[in-house]
Amino acid sequence: MVTASGGGHGRVALVTGASRGIGAACAGALLEDGWQVVFAARDAARTTAAVEACTASEAQRARALAAAVDVGDPASVDDLFSIIRSRYGRLDLLFNNAGVFPPHRPVDEVSDTDWRDAVRTNVDGMFYVMQRAFRLMKSQRPQGGRIINNGSLAAYAPRPESVAYTATKHAVLGLTRAAALDGRAHGIAVGQIDIGNAATAMTAHVEGGALQADGSMRPETRLDLAHIAATVREIARMPNDVNVLSVTILPTTMPFVGRG
């Protein structure tokens, strides 16, 4: 096992979708908290830039690794885990964050391509990465680890014109609950974070107006990424015999309870 440089605790974390947004913010927070962090995303150059932006010292740079992965491709995921095994020998935390949001369309207008892209990344990719993490966490000594899947409020309540995204996030909820059950015997805690309007490029439009269930357009507030990163960091600090099965974080005034 590779130990952390610069006084870190030496535990190893993998964050997918870590080239920007929620993933980059959470990977950076874990790095600051002493983790060795694998920043993984499809765009290698952007992922490397994210590592550079998140590392404030040489000690932190020694604990960060940029890795390219296409989560929807099982062979690419296998390559990623081969790197993790070779470099660290174990994995203590997975933040399974990579995902896409297809264009807003009524159900009858969703293209085959957009549907397949959503399922490939949000369901297939979530499963492939979680499965490989499970295999490593079961085989390593000491056994166990923690997996945090990035769900969505859409796992419980859809927005209009979001059938592909909503269907995939309902699937993530099922993946989380089934894996949490399977992980009990092996010290693997599996939970899910469901995030409201995070302040990323994907949600920039909501401040000007988001489509509501009654057909109206209303401005919505957004959540600073620092609060999301702090939540993931606090869950990651818990011992593996404590599971946060689900946690919801959203702007206080965002429509969710009673949405629709």
Image: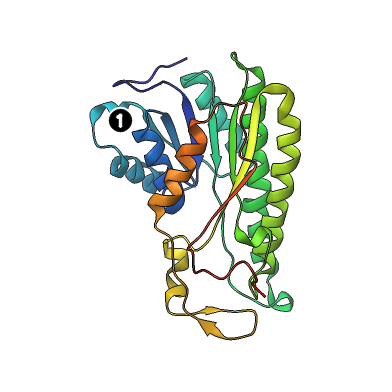
Give the image quarter of residue 192.
top right
Q: Report the residue at 43% width, 79% height from top.
A: 208
Give the image quarter of residue 186.
top right
| Residue identified by numbered label 1 | 60
20 shown above or below 259: above
117 shown above or below 33: below
Left or right: 189, with 236 as reference point: right
113 shown above or below 49: below
In this view, the residue in front, 125 or 242, is 242
Q: Amino acid at mark 1?
A: Gln
Left or right: 6, with 235 as reference point: left
Neighbourhood count class around disc 1 (C-alpha, 10 Å): few under 14, some 14–19, many 20 upward: many
Q: Position of residue 39 (x, y in %)?
A: 44, 38
Q: Report the residue at 61% width, 39% height from top.
A: 244
Q: Is residue 214 visible?
A: yes
162 shown above or below 174: below
Q: Position of residue 55 (x, y in %)?
A: 29, 37
In this view, the residue in front, 78 or 8, is 8
State the quadrant of the C terminus. bottom right
Q: Report the residue at 41% width, 28% height from top.
A: 35
